Image: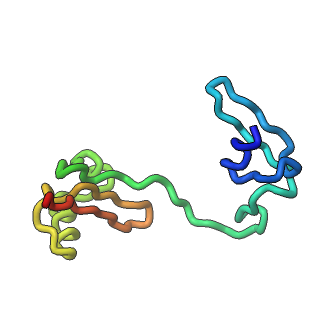
């Protein structure tokens, strides 16, 4: 059990209020209130909505329905990727758009 606690970043058992052994064999740790990580809410710091990025391309396949949900077009996506020298969707391993409008992309690697 001590090994599992350490693997969850709780090396000191005195920092733990409860440790629950789940039916799958995993351990759930509930730290003492003074040992919990500080959150923005604890500090009354406002945060932006993060949401989940929307997948636009996986392995060269364009998710047209996701573009449509975002009121975007393939032409827009082609234009954005061309800014990075990418002119073929088939060269893209992954492309996604976060809730702030930032485009993330990863091109496929060349087998060599």
What percent of the width, then of the height, locates residue 61?
Answer: 18, 48
What percent of the width, then of the height, locates residue 37?
Answer: 75, 59
User: What colour scheme does the image use?
Assistant: rainbow
Quadrant of the image containing the N terminus: top right
Residue 77 relative to residue 32: left or right: left
What percent of the width, then of the height, locates residue 58?
Answer: 25, 49
What percent of the width, then of the height, locates residue 42?
Answer: 78, 63
Taking the spot 20% from the left edge, 61% from the top edge, the residue there is 109
Q: How many marks?
A: 0
Q: Residue furthest top?
A: 23
Taking the spot 13% from the left edge, 61% from the top edge, the residue there is 112
18 shown above or below 32: above
> Toward the viewer: 90 or 75?
90
Taking the spot 86% from the left edge, 50% from the top edge, the residue there is 32
Q: Residue furthest left?
A: 88
Residue 16 relative to residue 79: left or right: right
The quarter holding residue 70 reads bottom left
> Toward the viewer: 7 or 58?
7
The quarter holding residue 49 reads bottom right
4 shown above or below 48: above
Taking the spot 38% from the left edge, 66% from the top edge, the residue there is 101
Residue 98 relative to residue 20: left or right: left
């Amino acid at each position: 059990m001590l090994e599992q606690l350490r693997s969850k970043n709780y090396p000191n058992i005195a920092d733990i209020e409860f440790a629950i052994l789940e039916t799958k064999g995993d351990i759930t740790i509930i730290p003492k209130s003074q040992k919990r990580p500080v959150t923005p809410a604890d500090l009354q710091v406002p945060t932006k909505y993060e949401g989940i990025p929307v997948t636009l391309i996986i392995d060269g396949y364009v998710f047209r329905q996701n573009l449509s949900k975002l009121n975007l077009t393939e032409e827009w996506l082609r234009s954005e990727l061309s800014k990075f020298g990418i002119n073929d969707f088939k060269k893209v391993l992954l492309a996604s758009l976060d809730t702030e409008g930032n485009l993330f992309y990863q091109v496929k690697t060349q087998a060599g």
